[in-house]
Amino acid sequence: MKKISSDIKQISQIKYQEKALEYWGPTPDEARKIMVGKSKALKDKRTTLKDAVKAHIKDGINLGIGGFVNTRVPFAAVQEVVRHGAKDLTLSFQSNSICVELLAGAMILDPDRVSIKRAEFAWWGYELIGIAPLLRHLTTNGLIEVDDYTNYGMSVRFKAGAMGIPFIPIRDHGGSDMELINKGTMTECPYTGRNVYLVPACHPDVGLVHVSAADMNGNSRIFGALCTCPEIAMASTYTIVTAEKIIPEDNIRNFPNMTEIPHPAVDSLVERSYGAYPGACYGFHWFDMDHIKMFRAACEDFRVTGDKTKLKQYYDEYVFGCEDHDDFLDKISYKTLNKLNKLDGGQPIILT
Amino acid sequence: MPEYSHVEMIAYTGSRVLEDNTIVFVGTGLPIVAAMHAQYTHAPGLLMIYEAGSLAPILDMGMPLSVGDTRAGRKATYMKGLCGAFELTQRGYADFAFIGGAQIDMYGNVCSTMQGDDYNKPRVRFPGSGGAGAMAANCEKTIAIMALEKRRFVNQLDFVTSIGFGNGSPDYREKAGVMGSGPYRVITNQALFGFDEDTRRMKLLEVKPGVTPEQIQELVEFELISPSNVKEMAEPTEEDLRLLRDEIDKEGYFLKRQIQK
């Protein structure tokens, strides 16, 4: 039970069920035990997405999703999760659009293949393009449980997980309704005597992260905004990394300061160019607004009409109609990819 | 005076309230347009934080379409991730925050999570806090951009997403454990609001030429503090409009968009 609080209850009218102060995934002790039990060898971790997903994705897991809204999102990995199937998922992320909507759409089409039980997050939508139709459908119909944080709250929960601490004190959520409804709690600072908010660490069972480049051991470089990818990779008990490019270990050793994810945090590594497409990847390509709009329109059509035809058409064409991400990219024209490359491919990155 | 749209007036007013040699934490859309306009005009030393992780980018590849846009990192001076960006705000490096939302109350609290009375089964679900709740907590001054409508300027929020002055009591923010001083301005196309120092209630500062304070009060559910010396809002010049239309938002992504109903 939450004992200390701000004065939020004086202005709040929301009905809610207080959440237990617990973890929606591995506890810090469980997460540590798994990490301690792993081989730390520098070894070639390259595999296919199909095998990586088969090895780690199971029903009932907490799935951590990297990137931010439509930037460097692990879309190829999420597509493979949908093909593989996973039920009763807990999703944890800060802000996302297409990855979480793709999982939600898969649940609407066939809940025996993919289902989301609950989600802990800060933001689920498309920014400029509009609200997320399937989030609205799932929440207003009471089909999933949600737990709201700020973008910092979710990011720092992964950071606490990456740091190996059970919670972290922060300066937001207090005085808002998130203080009442989420798994954080207000406490008195032992040093200043002031109220300070605590949020629990978040250890996903499996983290999905797309990076700019990695060596075969999984040492990863990220260019552009890091989003919360290093923290998610290091907090997760198992991490699948997809990389635009595989680079030699010597390059990593020449500039070790540029390694954002160290090799022991990576369990499976997949060389996957355009792994974030239709999202963007700094230094490689911009996002494909037309494709995102097309997918969102199929979702919105379902939300408004209740008819799943257009939604099913998208999945039949772009998810189940593809053996893997290469097949998916085959359906996107060269002209489109070339245009996206030109819109962001010139930003400087260092692969040497 | 040249003709301008509602959104152009909001972007221009957003630019006006920013100051040179400060740091503004921007959200997607009009805040980016407003901050770029300020850089082009009265505040060349204004710097932006984008929450995906960049500080002080030079946007020479064009306006980012979202705060996660890869171009928001263009030629930045410092680039980490979300933790790095928000820790700048906790530490006191961010002077201004720009937030938006579906509802605002007289103490500047903002809702952007849901509408309805039951958190577990909302009538309408919005994307959620995103960065807004953290920006409103820990950037020093919060600027909200809102459409001026009675259903948005309300007595009672459905959900408090971004903290303002809470119930208006002087220690609300301190008891909430947040660091920033709180709501500073509320920008709409017809009026600019501030907050009364003693009561922390929303106060009318400026109205669009031709509009009366009474007409503004008609669009607001709660009682505004309406001093006798309410000023007229400055209007964008030809040059301001040229910058907005031809230099900043060339494709009209945000400026051609009507305020979402």
Image (cartoon, rainbow, N blue to C red):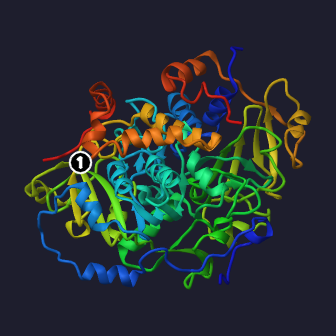
Q: Quadrant of residue A179?
A: bottom right
Q: Quadrant of residue B219?
A: top right
- Residue at the spot 69% in from the left edge and 77% down from the top edge: A5
Question: Which residue occupies the foreground of this view, B108 or A93?
Answer: A93
Residue A264 lies, in percent from the top left, at 22, 70
- Residue at the spot 56% in from the left edge and 37% down from the top edge: B29
Question: Which residue occupies the foreground of this view, A240 or B222?
Answer: A240
Chain where mark 1 sits: A
- Residue at the spot 70% in from the left edge and 47% down from the top edge: B102
**Circle 1: element type:** loop
Residue holding disc 1 = A272
Residue A256 seen in this snapshot: yes
Residue A28 lies, in percent from the top left, at 40, 81
Tell me the amino acid under the disc marked 1.
Answer: Arg
Tell me: residue B258, above or below residue B163.
above
Residue A90 lies, in percent from the top left, at 48, 66
Residue A259 seen in this snapshot: no
Using residue B228 as the reference point, say whether residue B102 is left or right of it: left
Q: Quadrant of residue A342?
A: top left
Residue A68 lies, in percent from the top left, at 43, 51
Using residue A154 as the reference point, say whether residue B132 is left or right of it: right
**Within-10-Å neighbours for mark 1: few <14, some 14–19, many 20+:** many
In this rendering, the count of numbered labels is 1
Instruction: Please identify the quadrant where the N terminus of chain A is shown.
Output: bottom right
